Image (cartoon, rainbow, N blue to C red):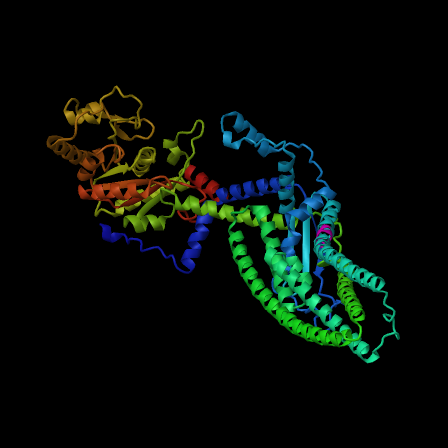
Amino acid sequence: MSDQLALSGPIDLHGGGAVRRVLRIWRRHLALFVVIMLAVLVLGTGGMLLLKPSYTATATVVIAAPSADPLAPTGQQPVARLEDDRPATEAALLQSRDVAAAVLEQIPPVPGKASFSLTKSVSAFLCRKGLSYLCAKPVSTDPQTRQQSAIDAFLGNLTVTPELHSRVIDVSVTAKTGAEAAALANAVVSNYQRIALARQTADVNNVAQWLDNRTGELRQRWLDAVHKADNFDVKHGLTNTTEGTTANPLIDRQITETAVNLSQAQARLAAAQARADALHDAAQHGNTSALVSLSTQPILVATANSLLQLQSMRDDTAAQYGRNYPKIRSLNRQIAAARGSLNSQTRSALASIQTDLISARAETKQLSDNLDALRAQAGAQSSPQAEYQSLSEEAQSARGVYETFLDHAKEVVDRAALLEPPVSFVSHAPAPTRPTFPNHVKLVAGIIVLALVAGAAAVLVRDYFSVGFEELDALRATVQLPVLAAIPFIAARRNHLIARHVLDEPFSRASEAVRGLAAQLSLLVEGDVSRSVLVTSASPEEGKSTLAVWLAVTARQGDQKVLLIDGDHRRGGLMSKDRVQLGFTDLLDGRASLADVIQTDPETKIDFISAGDAMSRPFNASDIARLRGLMAGFKNSYNLVILDSPPLLAMTDALVYGSVVDQTVFVCRWQQTSRQAVTACLDRLRSYGARIPGIVVSMVDQNSTMAFGGDYSRREMKLISRAYST
């Protein structure tokens, strides 16, 4: 008989088949999709309206290019090239905690007003119920802790972004009002300029202080030399110490010229020695700022500047994230490398200065020897005059050294007046008139997209985790059996029994499906012979008993003699609610005859046998043999015998009934009966000899187009009902 009905092939999940499947899933769960989408739209819109507006103001600055130093020697002007790390360094310095603290000191944060917060209220309620991890943290009373918290909050609203391949940096601050945001953004730049100038001025002042101390010592040395020469002149009563009174003008002129040259050489030697001492002292004490101020070598200055920037970045990062932050170790390695390069450049500079010192010492020694020879020659003429001349030359030499250091100190002071901040304003931050956040247009678009995605995800998840079959093609492909009928869900109504539905509405979808099932079962047998049909299912509440009644009523309307047997002796109640009367189990046990158990429904004229008493023992061989004989006898008296059995997953009676009837109809509830239950029950029925012509899907959604085709219109239904009634 199975050859008479073609089995369904595999489901097409490629191309148009996959698209159609997705569209069917979407339509089947359209209500869920709409509910989820509306819920997300409502919640998202409500959350968007609860968001507090914030304003972002942006100030634009540019990194100052190195300007020409009018006090620097020719050929030692700074290079105008921008280092690769300069924008990132300036951005990090602009975002440092020192700058944030200065800004908050200038513009203190405005304390927020206490407002109702649903999240805080829920957290407080759960905290009172014992969930301590949801309790709000107590506010610290320590001023330093509160200041650090305010700095952290301000840095969280501060964004410093260097623009690529340029000197421009954008400084953005987010605040509650536009005016506050603009004021804070401008204050960040102005305070950074002030702090940077203060650091540069402090470095120059340190160098100037050292030069002042050294110059004072040299001035005292010069005055002491002059005082010593004057005392010698007075003591010996020299008369030819003034110009034009010497006894030997030639020797005196040579002594004078040699003394002048010696003074100049000693000045150069003293300047070189002073520069070498200062550079050596700065290198030993690690005074990088002094190295920048004292050295005249561009490479050493650039290396010292790089080391200063790395040290400042490390200090700022350590203050913000702690000494154990991973970036600190990387900065320490860079600082160590920069310090090693600085030491190497310092040694090179010291070596260069040492060469100048050796040359100056040699020149000084040569001039001193010449001066000594001239003095010896002049001493033969006048020993006091030669001594006085020597003292005068020493005073001149001391004066030359003093004037050299004095000029250098003046240059440092003049250079301090030329200091400039590292960044300057391109444009101040204007106060925004519209809030930057929330952007209602983008948020609404995002909420709509999120609602669509959430609805689609809910539909897919609902379909993925669905335990039952939702498509007839999937059911056919799984069980390899035809779907004989798809019966829609009939809701219970007052004064309307579901068992009478095929009588009250003979042309409804359910009635048409039952008539089609009866016709297919008739086509599966040859000739006009009596037959027995078992109606079973995997679980209770799947509609098998209702289908058995509808099938009996439909067959009885075709003038067939129908016997309906209630085989569910655990529950019973089919066609009759009286559990005291004799039934099918009594007939099997021999406690009653056919005349005792067969009853007739007065309205439908259907003969039926109730369940009888519950059996506490399993079926044995004699029970099965008697059951076969009873079914054969029933078919001699009736055209159709319908047996309603207990669910297969609850009891095994259906396996016995299926082995003695002609046809077994398995009922599967739409979207409820799991795939595993259906396949397991069908395998058990087949293994015990049940002849299963197909599957009946029950309680299908009335709006499902996967199970039903076109339907009669209301006008057509009225015409059919009128013709049927006449």
Q: Is residue 278 visible?
A: yes
Residue 85 in picture, x, y percent from top left: 61, 62
Q: Give whichever of 594, 661 is nearer the camera.
A: 661
> Going by the picture, which residue comes out furthest to the bottom?
250
Main secondary structure found in the magenta portion: helix
Of 479 and 306, nearer the camera is 306
Q: Report the residue that reaches farthest toward the left.
A: 622
Image coordinates for residue 596, horizontal then vertical, percent: 20, 22
133 lies left or right of 264: left
Residue 712 is at least partly visible in this image: no
627 lies left or right of 551? left
Please, is residue 58 above or below residue 389 in the view? above
Q: Is 535 situated above or below 707?
A: above
| Lateral position of residue 474 relative to residue 445, left or right | left
Quarter occupied by residue 262: bottom right
Membership of 293 in magenta stretch: no
Residue 299 vs residue 375, the one in the foreground? 375
**Farthest-out residue, top:** 580
| Figure check: 76 above or below 118 | below
Rendered view: 170 above or below 621:
below
In the image, 535 versus 710, the foreground residue is 535
- Image-quadrant location for residue 613: top left
Q: Quadrant of the C terminus?
A: top left
Q: Quadrant of residue 343?
A: bottom right
Residue 139, x across and y down, in percent:
61, 32
Instruction: Tally the numbered discs.
Output: 0
Per the rendered image, the range of residues in magenta is 191-196
Q: Is residue 331 left or right of residue 292?
A: left
Residue 126: image x %, image y %? 52, 28
* Residue at 84% over, 78% down: 249
